[in-house]
Amino acid sequence: MGESKVADHGWRVFRYPLGYRIVSGLGSLFLGACTVLAFGPGSGIEGLPRWPVLLYGLATALSACLLWTLLPRIETDDEGVAVARLGLRRRVRWSDVRAVEHRPSSASLLIRGPSVELRVHRQLREFIEFYNILKAAVPHEALEPPLKLPFTVAASLTLRFVLGFWFALFVGLGYVALRGGATRTALIPLGLALFCVYAWLRQAVVRYEFERDGVAAVYVLGKDSYRAADLRAIQLVQRGAEIVLQMRFKGKTVKLSDNRVRTAPERIYDCAMGAYPVQRG
């Protein structure tokens, strides 16, 4: 995690990682050059669409969008917060903040003022520190209502989509092998397809249930329960662009991140720290 700094005029300045910006900038230049070259002589066959142009163009646009999100610096002081990018600066006073919205799906935090919206992405260095400053400074009613026990957190669909893709691929390979008469060869992909079914039923979490007496990870078949009495520590940590809530139980650690749940981990953390008697991590 990088360091933020205090400017001479008293503002706290947060930036996105320099390495991310360099990689995104170089990637945009390289892909843009490939897009231009794809228009050149011999880049396509007469009468057919030039798919390399579309492919490189789309990749360039995605890389440029990523670079654009990483360019700003975020400045905070006693009066408010500002986002500065390429000579443009937008600012909102803390007292004027109308809403703070967590957007786990886009890995961002949206700060709404009377006439301006500021978006802060998870890639921000020391995002957790920035969030704590924001939470303490804005009007209480601007924050999303706190979670209260008992509550349920839906799990991300990413793992289930991945398992579904591999299941379809292995079934297809097995079908092709069976059509070709290679029965024994077909057993391998079909066996892997069955493993995907098992993982989808028993390893892909559907939701997390938070109760006063503990936490449960619920699957399509069955669930794993963790007692509050066995809870040893709760930590909210940042790993690159990912915010992770770690709940260390006796013999097991439950990790909830943006990639695993569809509720911002910091919101769960705020509730868990008040609900379970553990030392702040």
Image: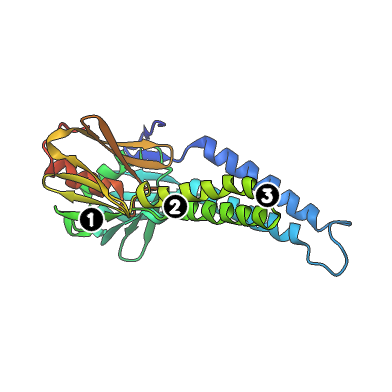
Residue positioned 18% across, 47% down in the render:
271
Which mark, residue 152? 1
Residue kind at label 3, given as amino acid type: Ala
Name the N-terminal-most of marks 2 and 1: 1
Camera-nearest residue between 174 and 30: 174
Q: Position of residue 124 (x, y in %)?
A: 41, 42
Q: Amino acid at mark 2?
A: Val
Front tag of 2 and 1: 2
Kindly report the distance in space between the C-alpha atoms of the residues bearing marks 2 and 3. Answer: 23 Å
Q: Residue at x 22, y 52 (%)?
A: 138
Question: Which of the two discs, 2 and 3, sits closer to the camera?
Answer: 3
**Which label belongs to residue 197?**
2
Q: Position of residue 82 (x, y in %)?
A: 37, 50
User: Which quarter of the image is occupied by the C terminus?
Assistant: top left
Q: Is residue 56 left or right of residue 186?
A: right
Whole-percent x, y for residue 109 in the image: 35, 53
Q: Are marks 2 and 1 in contact (CB under 8 Å)?
A: no
Identify the secondary structure beneath mark 2. Answer: helix
In the foreground, 43 or 200: 200
First in sequence, mark 1 or 3: give its number. 1
Identify which amino acid the numbered label 1 is placed on. Answer: Thr
Work out which residue is located at the far bottom of the displayed protein and give it.
47
Q: Marks 2 and 1, Cα distance to the nearest angstrom?
A: 25 Å
Residue 48 visible in the snapshot: yes
Q: Are marks 1 and 3 in contact (CB under 8 Å)?
A: no
Contact flag, marks 2 and 3 (Cβ < 8 Å): no
The residue that mark 3 highlights is: 182
Cα distance, mark 1 to mark 3?
Answer: 47 Å
Neighbour tally class for label 1: few under 14, some 14-19, many 20 plus, Cα within 10 Å: some
Is residue 79 visible in the rendered structure shown here? Answer: no
Q: Residue at x 39, y 40 (%)?
A: 14
